[in-house]
Image (cartoon, rainbow, N blue to C red):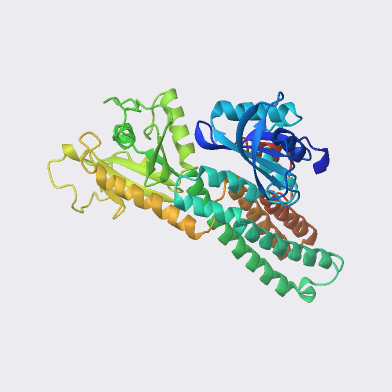
Amino acid sequence: MTPPAARDTIAAIATAPGAGGVGIVRLSGSRSREIAQTIAARELRPRHAHYVRFRDEAGETIDDGIALYFAAPASYTGEDVVELQTHGGPALLEELLARVCALGARRARPGEFSERAFLEGRLDLAQAEAVADLIAAGDARAARAARRALDGEFSRRVEALAADLLAIRVHVEAAIDFADEPLDTLGGAALRTRFTAASTSLDDLLAAAERGRRLRDGLHAVIVGPPNAGKSSLLNALAGSERAIVTDIAGTTRDLLHETVRLDGVELTLVDTAGLRDGGDAIEREGMRRARGELTRADLAIVVIDARDPHIGLASVSDAIIDVPARLFVYNKIDLLESDYDSPGPADIGGENRVFVSAQTGAGLDALHARLRALAQGDAADAAEGAFTARSRHVDALLRAREELDDARAQLDHEMLDLAAEALRQAHEALGEITGRVRADDLLGHIFSSFCIGK
C-alpha cells in the first residue's frame, strides 16, 4: 500500500453537476492544507470554518466562501482533507478547481476519495460501496438500508462469520497433526456442531444479502408465456409507451427487451421475451434460448396466458419457470371473453396468485399494478428488515463460501482433514472479498470506477 505522504494530492468538485446555491471543491492529500492556504491567503486551523476570499494567481477574487480543514487521520479519507465551499455556479467551481490543480493537485478519478478511505482503513470495502448506494438510493427504504451498510451492519456479520470459519479451520488443522487418532477423540462432535452453526449463520446472511441486493438493484421481472399471449402488449401497457412491436403473427418478439418502471419508489426491471413453444425457425429458437437464460436471473416470472384457453402452450412455460422464486399469472385478453372471467374453474391456473387484464383496453391494469407494487414492496420491506443493502458480487461471494463450507463438511465426514482445511480456507477468502480483507487490484479498480467523482 502506498504511504499517504507519497500519494498525489487529489481534487474534485464534490457537489452534483449543475447550478446550485452552494458548491464544494474537495482536496485530499499531504498538500491539501498548503494549497488551500495559498488560495485563501490565510492559515487554516483544523475543524474550524474560515470565511475567506478565494484568489487566483493574480490575486483577484474568484469568489468568497468557507474553507474547512480536516487534519489526518481524522478525516473521510484518513489524509489531510480540505473543503472549499463557494457559490454553486459550474463555471465558478471549474475555475476554482483549475486554480487548485495549478498549485499542485491533480483531478481525482471517480471513487478515488472513497478508495483512499478504504486504503487508510477508514472504511472497509462493503462500507465504501454503501457510500455509492446511499447516494443512488431511490427512496427512504433504500437510503436507510444503505446507511446501515455504511455503519458496518453487513461488515460486522461477515467478519463474525469469517471468525467462526477461521476457528473451525484452526481446529481442523490442529487435528491434522494427530492423523492417527480418530476424529471423535479430537473433538469431532464439537467440530460438527460448529460446522452446523456456521452453515446456519451463512444461510441467514446469504438470505439477508439477497434481499438487500433486490432493494438496491430492483426487482428483476421477466415476462414469459406462449406466443401470441400478449406479452409485448403487456410490456407496452406497463411502460406507458410503445416499447415493443406488437402484431398478430406468432413469434414476432425474437430478442430480449428491457424496460425499467418505478412502483412507489421501488425499481422494477421488466424483460419482454420470445414466446416459448416447440419448434420455430432458427432465429425464434435463439430467442427462446435467451428467454430461458433470462429466467435463471429472474426474481419474478410474469406468466402471460390467453384467458380464452389458459392451457394452450403452458407446458413449455411451466418447465422454464420452475426455478424462479416468485410467479404471477396474468390472464390477458379478457375483453375477448364471453363469460365471467373471474370465477374459479377447471382451467384455473395460478390459484390466488393471478390477475385478469386486457392489455388492449386497459381493463384490470390497476389490479396488476397493485399486485406488482405489493411484490416489489414486499421484497423491499424484507430487505429493510435485513438491515443493509448488498450487491451482486456480495451474493456471489457468499454463494461460493457456502459451496466451500458444504465441501469442507463433506470432507470432514470422510475424515479427509487436509481437503477440509483447504475448503475452509477458500470459504474464508470468499468472505474476505466482501470487506476487502482479501482483494485483487482489478477488483478494487472495477468497484471504485463506478463511483461519483468527488467521492
Q: How many marks?
A: 0
Percent x, y for residue 218? 46, 45
- Which one is nearer the viewer's eye here, 232 or 29? 29
Q: Pick the quarter of the image with the C terminus.
A: top right
Residue 165 in the figure: left or right of residue 3: left
Residue 318 appears in view: no
Percent x, y for residue 90? 55, 28
Outermost residue to the left: 338
Percent x, y for residue 270? 40, 38
Residue drawn at (37%, 47%), measured in percent from left and top? 264
Residue drawn at (67%, 66%), measured in percent from left and top? 195
Residue drawn at (63%, 56%), measured in percent from left and top? 402
- Which one is nearer the viewer's eye here, 356 or 52? 52
Percent x, y for residue 443? 69, 40
- Which one is nearer the viewer's eye here, 77 or 101? 101
Q: Pick the quarter of the image with the N terminus.
A: top right
Residue drawn at (78%, 71%), measured in percent from left and top? 183
Q: Quadrant of residue 92?
A: top right
Residue 120 appears in view: yes
- From what the image shows, is residue 98 above or below residue 137? above
